């Protein structure tokens, strides 16, 4: 029956007939299942939002929500019309039939009302009248042809009143058809038929009314009144009124009154006692039913029967069947007992009382930047289905905290299901509860507690009904990280908060090498975090400072350069390498180095105190060997350079002792060591004789100012050789200058190679003439063959780069007392240079032979004889090999 | 000079880590389409901006992994709007779908629940599809840059749906109230 009605109504909806197939199929599946549902109202927004949870690379479970899609519900017209009627009527009398029109569409509609009649006789007139109070009697004398505007779900009550012509014959019947047509969709109609039979006997009409047609659950008492009238032409007997109390109401004992007996209470429990013409009972003849038998109703007589009911406390709100009441009646019309006829139906509307409670929750601890999950319970303590908007209110949480609302699973977002733009619980039945999850996403940088945020629930039915609850986070646990050497966890060097007072691990390295550290970064907090890796000699990391020339490179276990650990899951750790590059020439010392792991988000950090010990390297060099000539009894000065190529101070006379000694092989020859204190490259009278490097103090012009030679420092030493008086021409001497290094420096002994090699030799040959050779140099940076500066004996300190040229000036002077004959000045092109011929070699006397341009060889000036004081000057250039 | 260089490194490093903190996640794009039956019996779609009671809406969600790394245990959830929609059984794609009435407990269809009837006996009852409120698909692992699509159809509740379920609802209620006694 239901299915037939549904299909029939659907057939009327021609605008949906093309859509019908799919919908009908769906309906067929749903027909056997489901919950209390109502079509959403036209204009309702159906919002939907998908979500997903997933585990990201750090194994953190994350939630994503989609965009929200909104579908607006369109209007579809639908109605029901009840009920068909059947009554007897006297000749020339009136008959009225109550009808109820319900707008079962999902939007406001207006319904046209029309009537027609056919049968053995025609009604003199059939008119429709409004019956707003549903008592089955026209409210006024104004006929109507429309229901007026009806909201979705609204009902409209009216009566059809027919006037029977006097020409009708007893037994004739007439059928009135009442038709209601939707204005929104004209093809949607419904009709009822009212069958009228002309009677020559008694005709009783009964209508039903209630004193107040709406109220709260538990309200009352309400009074129902049944009014009967004999509109026939004979007396009626045994009018039996029957009224089943609906399930949402409860009969009030001893509340029945009959108009003929006034204030006399009609007994409820006795179905046999005749109380002055009425036999009344409740719950005796039939359970939960009022039954009254009135012995006689004369022609034209009328009377009332009333009783009271209370509305049940658990009555569901709205115009429900549980509070819908229809009575029925039969009587003997003088000939037969009529069949049971229904009165009009009276609907009592239970008004909805909204109420809500909300309970909060407390979470003891959450990590920095973590997510706190509060579960609050919303309970609908009202009497009707309601939805509750959920919001968060006053919050003492740190700035930057975001709150999101989820359904009980903590994953599905709470969305707005009732179209007011605020997330809500969705429909909750009375006494229904729902858990709502509030997630607080904490800012990474905040700690401490406690923090509280209010949750608020607001009734959709009655927004003045609200509830709120506190959600408290007792504390935000401070994030921690531990930076250790070589291992992690218990026993790991550097375990616990740093910096440690002394180096945890000291790595030895030589200057010019890399010191390797293995570090473990352990994330001690409850959330995944990342850590920047830093190194500094400043324990406070005010700046990331390292000694000049030092660099640090952090690497992952695969050797890739990193500056950040990447994500380390809660409670996990990673190994990283710190490679500290120590430049060549770094002094032997132990240098404290601090490493730090610092989270840029949570600020969690740990410092680790380590150290690098640079081992000592001792190298002292003395250059070059020389060959010279001297006249018998004369002197010759040789220039040497002593250089400290190690990384420790040598020759300070305290720890490192460096003695400078000379030894001469030639009989009668002697030599003395001088220091070029003013660093001008020439032995001056002020340059002191020295025997140890400890005497190299007070130097000027870049010469050593403090005792000894610092790493990388050099000094110019002169060896002045005194030839033996009377030495024969051709006699020779080899003066050996030796720097003897002794003493431990930083525990490092003098390498054997150092003490053995630090000596130079100066070979002196006695010549008859006293020819003195002086070689001077000057830079010719552009290789144009012209010296850029004056010639000098000093070191060319700058510009002597590969490809540049150097000009040499060699002066031979006869300082003796007799002629020097067959003088030949020879000079080999120095190592790593080649003869430069742009300006050819010249000599002030004699002739020149040279190597080919850009080759190595000897430049030679054949001077011939030099008389005393006479000079010859050889000038040529070389180019430093590019 | 050394300090400045290291300072620069530090700046880069902070930038990199902040990029981590706000890295793109998985994106979810939801689309609602109205299923329209054409005269020739074939289906076509139009945007479901509006729909009358009884209309069928096809919801389709595209999940795209923008994290740059694979993500695992992807559980896609699509709610069924309460008070407005009912799920059309067997319309979920992929077909391996879990359903739930409370958003917490998910199980394959048909959902069942145990209630105590008026006679005091525990009986297993099939939950009406109209009470289904959530669909869930286990998409497993989503590779970096990959997308996965799920869809399901739902019907806007109409008078037929509402009328047809009211009788069974009463039955259900009486069974539940029996349990409370």
Image: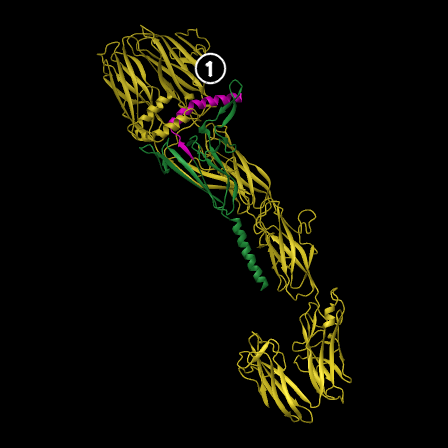
Chain colours: A yellow, B green
Residue at the outermost right position: A667
Q: Position of residue B8 (x, y in %)?
A: 55, 59
* Residue A189 vs residue A250, the one in the foreground: A189
User: What count of labels does the image hold?
Assistant: 1
Q: Which residues are magenta?
A: B152-181
Nearer-the-camera pick, A342 or A786: A786
Q: Which of the 4 image quarters holds residue A169?
A: top left
Quadrant (top left/top right/bottom left/bottom right) for the N terminus of chain A: top left
Which quadrant of the figure has residue A318?
top left
Q: Quadrant of the C terminus of chain A?
A: bottom right
The chain to which mark 1 is attached is: A
Q: Position of residue A488 (x, y in %)?
A: 66, 48
Residue A561 shown in magenta: no
Q: Residues within 10 Å of mark 1 (few under 14, many from 20)?
A: some
Query: Tag 1's secondary structure?
Result: loop
Direction from residue A104 to residue A661 in the image, left or right: right
| Majority secondary structure in the magenta region | helix
Q: Give the residue number, with chain letter if any, for mark 1.
A: A253
């Amino acid at each position: 029956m239901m299915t037939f009605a549904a299909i029939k109504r659907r057939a009327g909806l021609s605008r949906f007939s093309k859509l019908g197939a799919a919908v009908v199929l769906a309906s067929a599946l749903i027909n056997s299942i489901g919950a209390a549902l109502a079509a959403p109202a036209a204009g309702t927004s159906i919002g939907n939002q998908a979500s997903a949870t997933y585990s990201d690379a750090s194994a953190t479970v994350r939630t994503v929500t989609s965009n929200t899609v909104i579908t607006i519900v369109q209007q579809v017209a639908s109605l029901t019309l009840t009920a068909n009627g059947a009554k007897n009527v006297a000749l020339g009398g009136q008959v009225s039939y109550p009808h109820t029109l319900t707008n079962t569409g999902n939007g406001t509609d207006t319904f046209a009302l029309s009537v027609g009649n056919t049968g053995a006789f025609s009604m003199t007139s059939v008119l429709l009248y409004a019956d707003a109070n549903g008592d089955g009697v026209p409210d006024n004398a104004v006929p109507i042809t429309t229901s007026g505007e009806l909201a979705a779900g609204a009902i409209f009550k009216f009566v059809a009143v027919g006037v029977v012509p006097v020409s009708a014959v007893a037994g004739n019947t007439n059928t009135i058809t009442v038709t209601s047509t939707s204005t929104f969709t004209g093809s949607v109609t419904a009709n009822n038929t009212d069958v009228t039979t002309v009677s020559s006997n008694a005709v009783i009409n009964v209508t039903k009314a209630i004193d107040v047609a709406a109220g709260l659950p538990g309200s009352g008492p309400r009074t129902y009144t049944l009014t009967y009238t004999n509109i026939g032409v004979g007396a009626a007997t045994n009018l039996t009124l029957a009224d089943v109390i609906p399930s949402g109401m409860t009969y009030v004992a001893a509340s029945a009154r009959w108009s003929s007996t006034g204030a006399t209470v009609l007994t409820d429990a006795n179905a046999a006692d005749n109380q002055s013409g009425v036999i009344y009972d409740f719950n005796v003849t039939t359970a939960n039913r009022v039954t009254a038998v009135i012995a006689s109703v004369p022609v034209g007589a009328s009377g009332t029967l009333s009783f009271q009911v209370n509305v049940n406390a658990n009555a569901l709100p709205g115009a429900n069947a549980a509070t819908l009441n229809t009575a029925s009646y039969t009587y003997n019309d003088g000939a037969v007992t009529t069949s049971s006829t229904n009165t009009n139906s009276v609907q009592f509307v239970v008004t909805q009382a909204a109420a809500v409670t909300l309970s909060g929750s407390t979470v003891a601890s959450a990590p920095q930047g973590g997510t706190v999950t509060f579960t609050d319970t919303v309970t609908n303590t009202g009497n009707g289905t309601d939805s509750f908007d959920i919001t968060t209110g006053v919050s003492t949480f740190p700035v930057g905290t975001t709150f999101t609302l989820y359904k009980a699973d903590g994953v599905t977002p709470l969305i707005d299901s009732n179209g007011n733009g605020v997330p809500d619980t969705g429909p909750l039945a009375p006494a229904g509860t729902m858990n709502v999850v509030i997630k607080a996403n904490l800012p990474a940088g905040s700690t401490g507690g406690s923090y509280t945020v209010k949750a608020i629930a607001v009734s959709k039915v009655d927004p003045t009904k609200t509830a709120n609850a506190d959600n408290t986070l007792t504390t935000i646990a401070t994030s921690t990280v531990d930076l250790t050497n070589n291992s992690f966890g218990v026993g790991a060097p550097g375990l616990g908060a740093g910096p440690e007072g002394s180096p945890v691990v000291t790595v030895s390295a030589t200057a010019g090498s890399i010191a390797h550290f293995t570090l473990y970064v352990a994330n001690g907090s409850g959330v995944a975090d990342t850590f920047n890796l830093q190194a500094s000699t400043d324990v406070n990391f005010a700046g990331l400072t390292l000694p000049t020339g030092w660099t640090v490179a952090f690497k992952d276990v695969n050797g890739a350069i990193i500056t950040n650990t990447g994500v380390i899951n809660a409670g996990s750790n990673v190994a990283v390498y710190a490679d500290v590059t120590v430049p060549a020439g770094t002094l032997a010392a132990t240098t404290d180095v601090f490493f730090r792991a610092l989270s840029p988000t949570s600020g969690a950090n740990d410092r680790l105190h380590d150290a690098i010990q640079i081992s000592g390297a001792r190298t002292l060099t003395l250059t070059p060997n020389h060959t010279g000539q001297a006249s018998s009894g004369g002197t010759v000065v040789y220039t040497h350079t002593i250089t400290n190529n190690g990384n420790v101070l040598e020759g300070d006379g305290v720890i490192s002792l460096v003695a400078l000694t000379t030894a001469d092989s030639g009989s009668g020859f002697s030599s003395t060591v001088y220091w070029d204190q003013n660093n001008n490259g020439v032995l001056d009278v002020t340059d002191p004789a020295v025997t140890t490097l400890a005497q190299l103090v007070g130097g000027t012009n870049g010469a050593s100012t403090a005792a000894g030679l610092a790493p990388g420092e050099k000094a110019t030493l002169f060896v002045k050789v005194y030839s033996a008086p009377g030495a024969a021409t051709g006699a020779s001497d080899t003066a050996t200058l030796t720097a003897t290094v002794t003493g431990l420096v930083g525990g490092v002994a003098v390498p054997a190679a150092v003490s053995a090699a630090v000596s130079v030799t100066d070979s002196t040959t006695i010549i008859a003439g006293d020819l003195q050779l002086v070689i001077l140099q000057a830079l010719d940076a552009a290789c144009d063959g012209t010296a850029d500066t004056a010639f000098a004996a000093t070191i060319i300190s700058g510009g002597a780069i590969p490809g540049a040229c150097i000009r040499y000036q060699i002066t031979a002077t006869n300082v003796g007392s007799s002629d020097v004959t067959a003088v030949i000045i020879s000079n080999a092109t120095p190592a790593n240079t080649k003869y430069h011929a742009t300006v050819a070699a010249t000599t002030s006397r004699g002739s020149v032979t040279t190597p080919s341009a850009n080759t190595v060889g000897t430049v030679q000036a054949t001077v011939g004889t030099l008389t005393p004081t006479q000079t010859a000057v050889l000038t040529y250039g070389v180019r430093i090999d590019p | 000079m050394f300090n400045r260089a290291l300072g620069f490194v530090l700046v880069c490093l902070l930038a990199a880590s902040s990029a981590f903190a706000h890295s793109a996640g998985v994106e979810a794009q939801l689309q609602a389409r109205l299923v329209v039956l054409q005269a020739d019996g074939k289906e076509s779609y139009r945007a479901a901006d509006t729909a009358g009671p009884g209309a069928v809406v096809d919801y389709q969600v595209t999940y795209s992994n923008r994290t740059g790394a694979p993500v695992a245990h992807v559980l896609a959830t699509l709610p069924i709007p309460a008070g407005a929609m009912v799920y059309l059984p067997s319309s979920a794609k992929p077909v391996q779908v879990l359903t739930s009435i409370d958003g917490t407990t998910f199980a394959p269809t048909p959902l069942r629940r145990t209630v105590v009837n008026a006679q005091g006996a525990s009986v297993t009852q099939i939950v009406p599809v109209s009470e289904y409120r959530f669909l869930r698909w286990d998409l497993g692992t989503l590779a970096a840059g990959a997308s996965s699509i799920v869809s399901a159809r739902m019907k806007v509740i109409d008078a037929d749906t509402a009328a047809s379920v009211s009788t069974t609802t009463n039955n259900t209620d009486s069974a539940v109230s029996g349990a409370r006694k």
